[in-house]
Amino acid sequence: MTEILITHGFVIDPTQNINGDVADVAIRDGKIVDTVGSGAKVIDAKGKVVMAGGVDVHSHVAGPKVNVGRLMRPEDKLFKSPMAQEKFRMESGFSVPSVFKTGYDYARMGYGFVMEAAMPPIHSPHVHEEIHDTPIIDEAALPVFGNNWFVMEYLRNKEVENTAAYIAWLIRVTKGFGVKVVNPGGTAAWAWGLNCLKLDDKVPYFEITPSEIITGLLQANEYLGLPHSVHLHQNDLGNPGNFLTTIDSLKLAEGIKTKNKFGRTQVMHSTHIQFHAYGGENWGNFESKAKDVMDYVNKAKNITVDLGCVTLDETTTMTADGPFEHHLHSLNHIKWANTDVELETAAGVVPYVYDKDIRVCATQWAIGLELGLYAKDPERVFITTDHPNAGPFTRYPRVISWLMCRKARDATLNTFRHKDKVIEATTLDSIDRELTLYEIAQMTRSGPARCLGLSKMYGGLAPGMNADVAVFDLNYKSMPTDPVAIEKALQRAALFVKSGEIVVRDGTVLSHGHKKTVWVNVKMPENPQVVRDITQCFTRDYTVGINNYPVRDYLAPHPYVIDVDVEA
Amino acid sequence: MAKVILTPKKVPELMLEAPCITTDAFAKKTPAQIADLEVREGKIPFKLGEYFEIVGNPGESAAETEIEIAGDCSRVKYIGTKMTAGLITVKGNADMYTGGWMKGGKIHIVGDVHSFCGIAMEGGDILVDGNAQNHVGCAYRGDWRGMRGGTIRIRGSAGNDIGTFMLGGTIIIEKEVFIHVSTHAEGGTVIIKGNVTGRVGGQMVKGDIYVLGKIQHILPGFTKVDQVRKEVDGQTFTLDHYIGDLGERHPKSKGKEIFANLYVRAAA
Amino acid sequence: MPKLITQVGCPYCGSSCDDLEVLVSDDNKTVLEVRNACIIGNNIFLHANDPTRPKLPRMRQPDGSMKEISYKEAIDWTAKTLIAAKKPLIYGFGSTNCEGMSAVGRVAEKAGAVLDNCASICHGPSFLAIFDNGYPSCTLGEAKNRADCVVFWGCNPMHAHPRHTSRYSLFPRGFFTQKGQMQRKVICVDPRETDTAKLADVHFMLDQGHDYDLFDAFRTVLRGHDIPDIVAGIKREKIVEAIEIMKKSRFVMIFFGMGCTHTDGRNHNVDIAISLTRDLNTHTKASIMAMRGHYNIAGPGQVWSWQFGFPYCIDLSKGTHAHMNPGETSSIDLAMRDEIDCFVNVGTDAGAHFPIEAVKHLKKHPFITIDPNFCMASEISDLHIPVRIAGVDEPGVVYRMDNVPIQFKAVIDGLPGVPSDEELFDMVYERMCELTQTEPVWLAAKAHRKYPSSAVN
Amino acid sequence: MAKIQLNMITQRSIEEGAAMEKGKTNPDYFTACSICEMNPEDMKKAGVWKNTNVRVTSECGSVIVKAIVPTQFVPPGLAHIRQGVWANQVVPPRTQSTGTPQYSGFLVTIEPAVEERIKTALELVQGSVGLWKKE
């Protein structure tokens, strides 16, 4: 029986409305408890902030396209692996870190759960191989559905039940977590070199539109009552003037009701909204529409979003939005990788340098922050960098310091060559709001945990929850005036307890912890038509056998399985 | 300039990795401190002093420091990498990465160098009296930003991949070159005084290549546009002017594409 | 009663066919019959029955003969040799599952070794090209379902990937290619008239070693510029005609092989092929794929990329970070430059497939072979440790040439006492940790094992 | 005696693959790989009869193999030894700093060696490192 008592810290836990009260946090056998015995290991957190472990709602950390990003970028490793710790596995990479560095760096920042944001189903054994090689952090993965032949076929015929049955089967065999949708229809069109930029563009051959796919999947997701909602990467990503499509896509959630037993309140999570909040007609008059987008998000209670903040680094973009990556490559002419995945999806990878002295990049930076600062309900707006698309996850502390300090934003803004143009194209300079650490905890802990339907396990410090506890060297009663100090404190947790075990101390990894793979087991009565369709499709169209497709159990050696019973 | 003389004491069993042999690392140190710098043979760290006799004191800065290696360094990698100023002279051969990622100063190799000489160089001068192997002034694997500045002069011949992904600076090879010159380059100048087997300027976007010898196979993506008289490394020649690589994407200026230039000495 | 096992993966070429049917004896010990496989796949499964397969490690004696020793001794010797070496080279993995490749990562890190795989002498240049230029590719199902123009450049699947053309590239009737071969234009580029070339609609018999020039001509024509009358021995009209075929196609699939990577220019031949593929994408849809040689030779590229960030030629001797630069950290160069002092050959045959000059250099130092069978490398080794055969008596994940993971089955029971690659490496690692008095880092490794360590010795 | 210079390539073949998987000491492997395919025109120039032994010499070594008429057409000037032990006796280990040896596209001279014996795989490999013992 391992007992730990973290004493005298400023506890911040939005799930219990605790905002900086000095209190103790007790841990026994991997769970938060009310009290522990006198033999407990006592850790003094006096003058420090105590929060739940971070929950990352959207990050590309494991799987084929992440690995393409690693493979194709040796220059991302050269002279760029500073944190290697003796007696631990080797760490490498900056924008796309190795699995070891991924686990260690998340832990050093006090993060306990990370959602891999896009799993091509046929590649799911690969995703799970990477997940089990990633130390410390708990992980789950979202299989992609938005361009899947079955989904498009069923939804063209308005067969929501069959779609749901297929989703249930696929999530189960891939040991996935929920329904990810990337550029619905557009990626399928990309298989012929085309795209769907508008919600009513027809997908070649399948004759279905993105809005029909989104609507159908929203219905199917609630039919099944999954822990997480549809997780949507919208059409027309990254193009000037896309905010109208963005708002139209968000509107598709209107009238859809949540149905689940996991405390989730939204029916749609719209991811990396920064890339979808652009005005203007071209890169010349490109401008922010963050306010318009957030005005809608703030009103629509059944929607959550994450930011996708640009961090102004040299990074590697990677997405199942194949046509977008091709487009991006035609802008920057750096190497381009693409993988079209039979019947399911596609993916592209392009390195990208967000140069602060390029007006567009600097404006993107401002948009990401504007979105966060316009959030009325921090429980529904989460901090991400769409790692590694807008920047590596290791920059979360910097993003947080920008959101928390006007001074930090100004300091960065003042270094831009096109400062005036950025101020003109955005409203950032007019925003004085500085988020509080409580709001940050909502945006990185309680909010994402609830959004994922995991609020009973992660994101809070209430008794019974997973004992993921992070302590940061920040005095809540007298926060540092220097934003760099905030960034530094969040970058390297003073202490991180993961599943009841001390894994990080003073920013140094001490243990490999006990990581888990979280997956959802959807149980529903067999649907004979769907079974027949799947069997036939594997015989005819796939190039792998159906027996070799489901992820074998040994590939997820420490599973945490969430059962979902679907009533017929 | 204050001069430190390194005399090789023994030949490394494996290759010796000695990125510490730079004026920057030596500056301000005593000979004893220099002898204490770490070098590696495989996974084992050793001291520089185990391989070299070290005599003389360096200057207060890299710029005031001269390093002379009074012997052969055929099995020593990374001499002068990332150096910013000063002078290194090797009175023999040097192995891989000589002058890699160099920013300033001068390196003079009296013998031959192995591959990756001047890799991703940003400034300074490298002079090699002998031959170079492959990948002179190239980019590190995967990097689209190759050599950016400085000058590499090889008095002998060189192998393949000269100035791959080059953005700036000058490479002069005084004798023959095998294949692949300025592949993917977006700038810079390469001068080859001997013959080249082929593949000159493949996938090249911008930049200049001068070949004073013959090219056995000119790429189909290069087309002859005119004949010019130009000064090349101090002498004036009549040169056939080609542009290319027509198969590659090229930036536009005022609606017109700008091509890379290949100048080949015209037949007498 | 013999048992028929279906959807079995074939551990030979990069096609990694997973539709084999294997009939095994009642006691699970003998392969009786193999269906659907090519001749080579057949031979692999049947060779596993060979009663002379080694069951114990063998150590070379002072008189040059080999003597059987226990696994415990072999593991101890391997661990000590790796620790003693300043820079060991661990090379191979042509026939190993990903579990083994993951396990060897720990050993190599501990040993400060260079970790390299067969790509080094095979598709390594393709990696170099991918580093420089990316990789617009797809899974093989896309080729099957969509490709109506297939280019075989410097590859000969009829010989090296016998079922590739029937399963994926040429003959199959796919979703949008219902007429199969009738619907596909086939272009072959090869200096010989290979059996693949004989199937092609257009065969470019180019001057050997001038692939780059020909690709450059293709690209120049595609951008609307003129080219000389003859390039690499091919007439201009023929090049223009091929470009027209490609532009008119709906989905162009380029497969390339050793003809590009083994000849002058190496990576740049692939590099420019990737550029061509990219250019074609402005006209139609185009994809390119390396014809990887072994059923899981894409595996180390994947496993080591997620562990170390590099697919091959990984120098772990620096302790603080991994370093990769083929030409320096590649097996052949390390050997020829005498830069390593111990060689471990795993699941491949460096003795047969390295240029003999390199073998001579490697043999100056301790030489260990880990392989299920006798091979040239095992016969010159100081120590030969047999292991189970992945895909035959050991299951595991493998990566097909298109990087699709396939979960292979075992069809028969392994030889008693013979460990899998993974188990062997874990035991070596454990021993190395014991000898250096350090804590092993297992992560999920031990829990991940398909069965509890089969406790050899 | 005649001697010609040809451009050598060494590549896979199904015969080699099938034999290799039976074991490299299997006679099939010997038959499949200890051969050199060359154009009949070149054979004539070199004074080589088909199915007789020739000596192939490159910058780094030489090997005795049997000259055969190509199973897949080889144009004049080119020669092919199937990938394997015999080919690798003459493959230059130079890599152009890419890690991959010059398996294809290197110059060799070919001359008749009718009286010479083709060594076995084991003899070649073990012999090269001083381990070969005559039975």
Image (cartoon, rainbow, N blue to C red):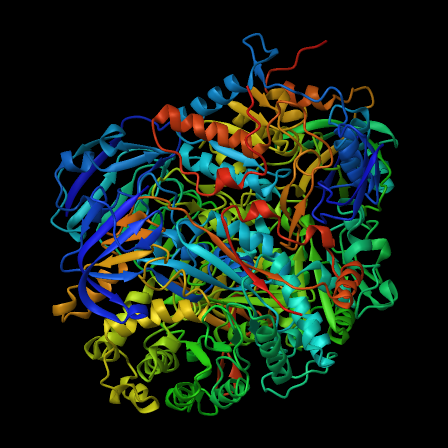
Please give the count of numbered marks on the rendered protein: 0
Classify C336 as above or below C239: above
* Residue visible at 67% across and 40% down in the picture: D107
**Place of residue B134 in the rendered image (x, y in percent of width and height, measured from the top left):** 48, 48
Is residue C393 toward the left or the right of residue A467 in the image?
Answer: right
Front residue of C144/B81: it is C144
Classify A298 as above or below C120: below
* Residue visible at 40% across and 24% down in the picture: C84
**Place of residue D70 in the rendered image (x, y in percent of width and height, measured from the top left):** 85, 41
- Confirm whether residue B259 shows in the render: no
Front residue of C303/C363: it is C303
Query: Residue A484 appears in which quarter of the rendering?
Result: bottom left
**Place of residue A108 in the rendered image (x, y in percent of width and height, measured from the top left):** 30, 54
Q: Quadrant of the C terminus of chain B?
A: bottom right
Is residue C61 toward the left or the right of residue C434 in the image?
Answer: right
Query: Residue D126 appears in which quarter of the rendering?
Result: top right
- Confirm whether residue C447 shows in the render: yes
Is residue C199 toward the left or the right of residue B77 in the image?
Answer: right
* Residue visible at 46% across and 72% down in the picture: A264
Query: Residue B191 appears in which quarter of the rendering?
Result: bottom left
Front residue of B29/C406: it is C406
**Place of residue B257 in the rendered image (x, y in percent of width and height, measured from the top left):** 53, 80
